[in-house]
Amino acid sequence: MEGKRPARRGWEASMSVALGLGLSFFVLTAIAGVLGAGIISGYQNTVDLLKQKADLLVASEINQTERYLGAAEDQAAFIVRQITTGDVTPGRDEAFTSLLSGALSATPQIVAIQFVDRDLRLVGAIRQDFDVMPQFLSAGNDPDITARMERMVERAKPFWGEVMWRDEFGQPLLNYQHPVIEDGEVTGFVSAYVAVQSLSESISDVETEFGLNAFILYGRDRVLAHPLLAFGYDGLTRLQPLPKLASFGDPVMSSIWQKPARITLEQRIMSGPGVSFVSFGDSTYILLYRELIGYADMPFLVGTYFETDDLLSEIYRLKWGIFASLFVAIVAAVAAAYIGRQIAMPVRRLSEAAKLIHHLELSQVKPIPNSFFTELNEAASSFNSMLDGLHWFERYVPRRLVQRLIQLDDEAGVKSEFREIAIMFADLVDFTSLSERLSADQSAEILNEHFAALAECIEAEGGVVDKFIGDSVMAIWGAPEASFGLADRAVRGALAIAEDMRARNTKRGDGHQMRLRIGLHLGKVVVGNIGSPDRINYTVVGDAVNVAQRLEELGKAVGDHKQPVNILISDNVKKALRGCYRMTDLGLCSLRGRQEKINIFCLHGKATDPPAGD
């Protein structure tokens, strides 16, 4: 299916034998050349690992801080969305206070979350001991809140304020402000107060995990987070909400900006941006730090430090050994690079092809060439055989559905559950009689063209083709991914199909004017993997599916039979629509197999579309 396979080589070498001989050669050469090269390599690995560990700790601190503070941004943004979309109305009512209390309960690092309107009326939720209490205040006499309101009206965008001290909490706080903008005007803002002490507790966990010292500075002269702050810190006030670096109880960190009296050559080698050396007593420490901006009025410096005296002395003792082993290292590196390339090339091809298969882009996957190594050659042969099977497999499995299930990437994404979805049934009118006048190839060609056009219209509106049943198509919206506006998506998909059918009938010159019936319904069904252990389908089951199919059948008797596509929708779909559409109320109708009548509508088009010609 993808072209001729590469021809097999006449002679192949075992990759395990080649690797064994090659590595043995390098080891013997290194030992014969410089006996101390192993010591140097071991020490260098130790230095690299320690640096990597320190860098990883700093990265973990940054990640922890971003997640820690990002939760406050998310909660504030969520509350603002609820207000601006009209889901809740700010005030003293239970719905709004419950929203604030729920946001506070979900994020333990937030000690208070508040809404302040333009009249400086405050409604909030505050954490007291182990309880979350509502808060109703007039904040007109609070200079902090008044200043933030003025700044919010001026800037009209979210921001992190300076670290502040609030007497009601008795600790320094980071604060995030998010404006509520309605009709282009700031009507208030949502504040989230984050406990600085909890941030120290958070990085203490990271410090324990990595076994290195961790800290966060607020600018260059104040300490924001440190294990010593995890249980509080005496002497903090509104004028001095954070400890000063110069008088802090960690002498190594407090000396970060003091230049050492003497900088050695080895220290210069290890120096760089974000690196500082501190001499304390008889020891030398290296401090690594990175800048983190966007969470206050000045940047954070996130860092760690560890002792370096032993490392530097080892460098001094072994520096002559480094020169002696340089030549051996170059030779070994060149040889290893060559053999590594020979091994890596087919492995890389397999990896790149596997990525394409993961995304079901089988048309872009080319057969893997044969390799010099037996194991890789066998892997290439097996892969190519698998690729042939997958090319057949993709013809029988809905590719878009499989892609979405892969994107969900967990078992929970495909478990069976009740969910509201939109269901479409689309059936060709009198195709059986038409096919009797055509050959098998002609019938298959017409059906394939028809199904391809329907699938394109459905998938363009976020739908998924569930199955083909003879000359009918079943499609769904809302699974496997939950989405909003299901009714409008399904209706737009149906109207796109109608427009495409008119265009194809106009273009078709063989006299085969095709007609289609479509039924649309919205309701709750069971969604998930249905079938036997040997074969399953991801599909939907429930009464709503039957209603959609019965609506399509009802199109034989009612609706607009002058148009090539007769679209019937249920009352559930009509009620869920957000857009404006032209439709005819057909009244209460009976569906086959159902005693209860339902209200049916015939869909003609968008409200802005001109009526279709007869």
Image (cartoon, rainbow, N blue to C red):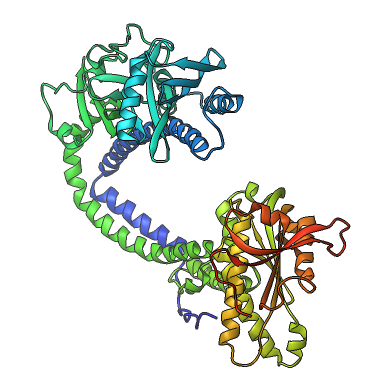
| Between 348 and 258, the one nearer to me in the picture | 258
Nearer to the camera, 143 or 113: 143
64 is higher (above) or lower (below) than 322: above
Q: Nearer the viewer, residue 114 or 51?
A: 114
Q: Is residue 504 left or right of residue 525?
A: left
Q: Is residue 328 visible?
A: yes
Q: Residue 14: x percent and y percent?
A: 47, 66
Can you say which quadrant of the picture contains the C terminus?
A: bottom right
Q: Quadrant of residue 531?
A: bottom right
The answer to which quarter of the image holds residue 234 is: top left
Looking at the rendering, in which quadrant would you find the N terminus? bottom right
- Number of marks drawn: 0
Give the image location of residue 580, x and y in percent: 58, 58
Q: Residue furthest left?
A: 262
- In this rendering, the answer to whether 78 lies above or below 147 is below
The spot of residue 41 in percent (x, y) is 29, 42
